[in-house]
Amino acid sequence: MLSKSEKYPELASKNECTGCMACVDICPTDALKSYMAEDGHIYVALEGDKCVKCKKCEQICKSSRGKYGDNKLYKSKVYAAWSLNEEEREKATSGGVFAALARKVIEKGGVVVGAYLDGRECKHIMIEKIEEIEKLQGSKYMASSMNGIYKIIKNELSRRLVLFSGVGCQCAGILAFFENSPYRDNLITVDLVCGGAPSHLLLDKFYDHYPKIEKIISYRNKDKYELRVLENGKERILCEKNLPLHGFNCELTNRFSCYQCQFACAHRLTDITIGDLWNYNYLVDEHSKGISTIIIHTKKGMSTLMEANILLNGLKWSQCINYCKRIVCGESHIFRPRKNLVENSKKMKFDEFTKLYCIAMKPLDFKMEVFRIYRFLIIRFGDYKIKKYIKKLLKEFE
């Protein structure tokens, strides 16, 4: 019999919650439900009448937000890499490394779990056929729902390999969930260098304003960012500033936890980290075909890469983190438009909302110009501090 004085579990606040959904899947009584809040992000609500106060959700919530790694560069090895399968490399946003890893795991009888964008919905799914890998390729620039995926992985892990791919906070949830699993060795984790999780409002408002657009095909090619869509059965590129792409780049709608991301670090608990190689001065002739940055954290990560059809090129940390601060630093400024996101989404018309959250300068607007300059100065000052920090890391490593 439960004591009336016994407290309900304490979960992360909205400012802390990463949306990993580990708490939802671990609950034995389905007392936790996910919901889309007015700011376009998924959070969790507790149904008190179903809760037995076992505190499993509280424990997994704390574990998933525990220490994920550090910036001690000597602990991990970094490479420039690409798939030796030309078709995989061509279809990928960068070097096709994830596709090569997925292919190898499936060939060995395993399954692959990753984010799939289907119209307005982005969610984690499981695949077990090589022809399905394409579903999980490419940048999504949208938070993926993890609801139910832990239970699916649990069912598979006892009998075969599972390759899980997600951003840092999602991998942290997976690692916490299966920390004590007797089948932990069957789990391979790959996290992605992340720029933050934007609000679902960007996608909803975009589709509502462009009803003839059937789906987003891609956000970028090898060389540049461009939104490619399917409209009336035909592909076209949207040249104007748009919410799904430019709204993501401006980082004015991210989850609050993204602005103090604790999962951006050089050495991580995952087996492998994958990102783009933004250093265009290295391997110049290969960039048009696509190159990935690969950071290997564990022996399992190294053996998995060596088995796959991937070419690894030695890379210095300075050739990597000087061009991508998000690998080692997850701090960024919260500007007023994020704080006022819910209010602005209700009162602003589409063009006005797009102009603010994409930092569009046409037509000219004095207030907008002032905000743009203010934002630019804040970001530049932040970049200056990060550059000093990166310089310190590299000096310590040497």
Image (cartoon, grey):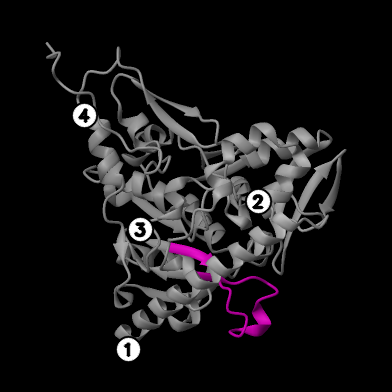
Earlier residue among tags 4 and 1: 4
Amino acid type at mark 4: Lys
- What distance separates the C-alpha of mark 4 from that of mark 1? 45 Å
Q: CA distance from mark 3 to mark 1?
A: 24 Å
Which residue corresponds to mark 3?
270
Residue 137 in the image: x percent, y percent? Answer: 60, 53
The residue range painted magenta reads 273-293
- Amino acid marked by disc 2: Gly
Image disc number at residue 398: 1
Q: Is residue 290 above or below residue 165?
A: below
Q: CA distance from mark 4 to mark 3?
A: 26 Å
Circle 4 SS class: loop
Q: Which residue is mark 2?
A: 247
Q: Earlier in the sequence, mark 3 or mark 2?
A: 2
Queried whether the magenta region covers residue 253, the answer comes back as no
Work out whether mark 4 precedes mark 2 in sequence or the reverse, and give the earlier one: 4
How far is disc 3 from disc 2 in space, using C-alphas? 29 Å
Please tell me which of labels 4 and 3 falls first in the chain: 4
